[in-house]
Image: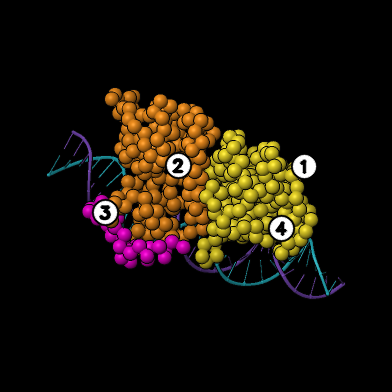
Chain colours: A orange, B yellow, C purple, D cyan
DNA sequence: CGCTCCCCTTGACCCAAATCAAAGCTCACC
DNA sequence: GGTGAGCTTTGATTTGGGTCAAGGGGAGCG
């Protein structure tokens, strides 16, 4: 293991998960750590690697020239991100908390996909899953109210990261707001409404640990 | 040629375009006409066919239970739509005007893709293009002002369908609004502002023929 | 020609969410 | 234990875009 320029630690490891068990000879797989807040790649940079979250959380976003930000997706342990069909990243990706990622060289992955039909199939599937998420999110951003958006967000996070009945959100209110096309104040108010209605509870003293007390009622709020 | 149950005419023809020149023996290709306003397929229906606009225009949208609508994309001549990786449509598609489409059976296309690597490659490319459009549209829906949205819409349509300097929009203001996450009144007001600023002009007596008089200034408005 | 049905624009008013502001809390660090 | 930097909540106020309403065309048709 060694420490690179950014103070992030890197060492070799196995690559597991949705890309299947690929022949080790074909793909060089590294594990890499990013510190909370550090950039993993930038929008419009050449896409050299494809990434998988091993531990931690990542946000992918676009910026307008005046700083308005839209987060397109949160990436949680197991998720693959930075997969581009063209050779260029279309989002900036940042570690939300200290995060460990596994990475493969994009070109070597493309090379394997040419040989192995199932890998090519997996790449199409992953792209299709990303597309489906984006399509659903367009409906949310274009047509849902603030309460509906926050309800949808909670249901999504509940599905993706609840362990032992508790949802430990890695992201702050501003991240949630930029994901939902709202302001952080509006997100906070919506969460307070849900709290007052008895639909959710906060655990501990930080407001990032949420328990869903009434999933059916929450689901009703997300049209 | 014959007339089917919906009064739409259908006959066989060649399939051309982005799917490349596929062996005719493999793919049965039909041409089909839909009348203005008629549904081509519904959300969550099994995806039996993949479509290409030969002539006319199509809108793909999602509905909330109370009728709020989000149009995800407009499909213009040459565009392929209804391509699903899973077996189910995730949008409803309707003809905006009288429209001719070419169609292939999804399963036969999948079959060809398994044999022919370049076709498989094309499918991934098309899905990636759809994804890129959706990603850009999330930024628009989440973070842009009404004027920025309308400016972006005009630039998109200018790129995609301007002939002889004139943009002949096939869709009504309500469609534009549901694409941009606005109301039709707001779209109309934004167009009036652009008209008053001398950025665009209307041609003829219908307000659907638009001439862009100052593309640079329009581009400045779309951050 | 005149009727009806849309489609579009424009004006008046309203409201959901943004903005502005303040204060409490946690946590890291000295 | 003190200090400061974030993060979050909550309140007051503003505002961009939604809603409601009215009226003017144009296109199709009897």
Q: Which mark is residue B34?
A: 4
| SS state under label 4 | strand
Q: Chain of mark 1?
A: B
Q: CA separation, marks 1 and 3?
A: 63 Å
Write down the quadrant of residue A190 in the picture: bottom left
Is there one chain holding both mark 2 and mark 3? Answer: yes
Marks 1 and 4 share the same chain: yes
Residue tagged 3: A164
Q: Earlier in the sequence, mark 2 or mark 3?
A: 2
Labelled disc at residue B164: 1
Q: Position of residue B149 (x, y in %)?
A: 58, 49
Confirm whether circles 2 and 1 share one chain. Answer: no
Q: Is residue B156 above or below residue C23?
A: above
Mark 3 is surrounded, within 10 Å at the Cα level, by few (under 14), some (14 to 19) or many (20 or more) other residues, namely few
Q: Which residue is mark 2?
A: A61
Asked which secondary structure carries label 2, the reply is strand
Mark whose residue sits in front, 2 or 4: 4
SS assignment at label 3: loop
Residue A2 vs B53, above or below: the answer is above
Q: Nearer the viewer, residue B56 or B120?
A: B120
Query: For the residues marked 2 and 4, what is the alpha-carbon distance in whole angstroms?
Result: 39 Å
Q: CA distance from mark 2 to mark 3?
A: 30 Å
Question: From the viewer's perspective, is residue A202 above or below residue B66?
Answer: above
Location of the N terminus of chain B (image quadrant): bottom right
Q: Is residue B128 left or right of residue B76?
A: left
Q: CA distance from mark 1 to mark 4?
A: 27 Å
């Amino acid at each position: 293991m060694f420490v690179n320029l950014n103070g992030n630690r890197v060492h070799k490891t196995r690559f597991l998960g949705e890309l299947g068990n690929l022949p080790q000879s074909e793909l060089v797989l590294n594990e890499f750590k990013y510190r909370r807040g550090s950039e993993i790649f930038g929008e419009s940079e050449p896409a050299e690697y494809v990434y998988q979250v091993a531990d931690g959380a990542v946000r992918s976003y676009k910026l307008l020239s005046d700083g308005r930000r839209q987060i397109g997706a949160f990436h949680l342990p197991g998720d693959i991100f930075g997969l581009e069909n063209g050779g260029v990243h279309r989002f900036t990706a940042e570690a939300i908390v200290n995060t460990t990622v596994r990475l493969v060289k994009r070109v070597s992955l493309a090379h394997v996909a040419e040989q192995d039909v199932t890998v090519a199939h997996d790449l199409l599937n992953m792209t299709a899953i990303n597309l489906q998420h984006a399509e659903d999110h367009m409906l949310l951003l274009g047509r849902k109210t603030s309460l509906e958006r926050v309800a949808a967000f909670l249901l999504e996070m509940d599905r993706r990261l609840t362990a032992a009945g508790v949802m430990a959100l890695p992201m702050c209110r501003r991240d949630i707001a930029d994901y939902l096309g709202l302001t952080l104040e509006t997100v906070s108010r919506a969460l307070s409404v849900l709290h007052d209605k008895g639909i959710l509870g906060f655990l501990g003293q930080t407001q990032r640990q949420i328990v869903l007390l009434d999933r059916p009622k929450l689901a009703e709020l997300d049209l």
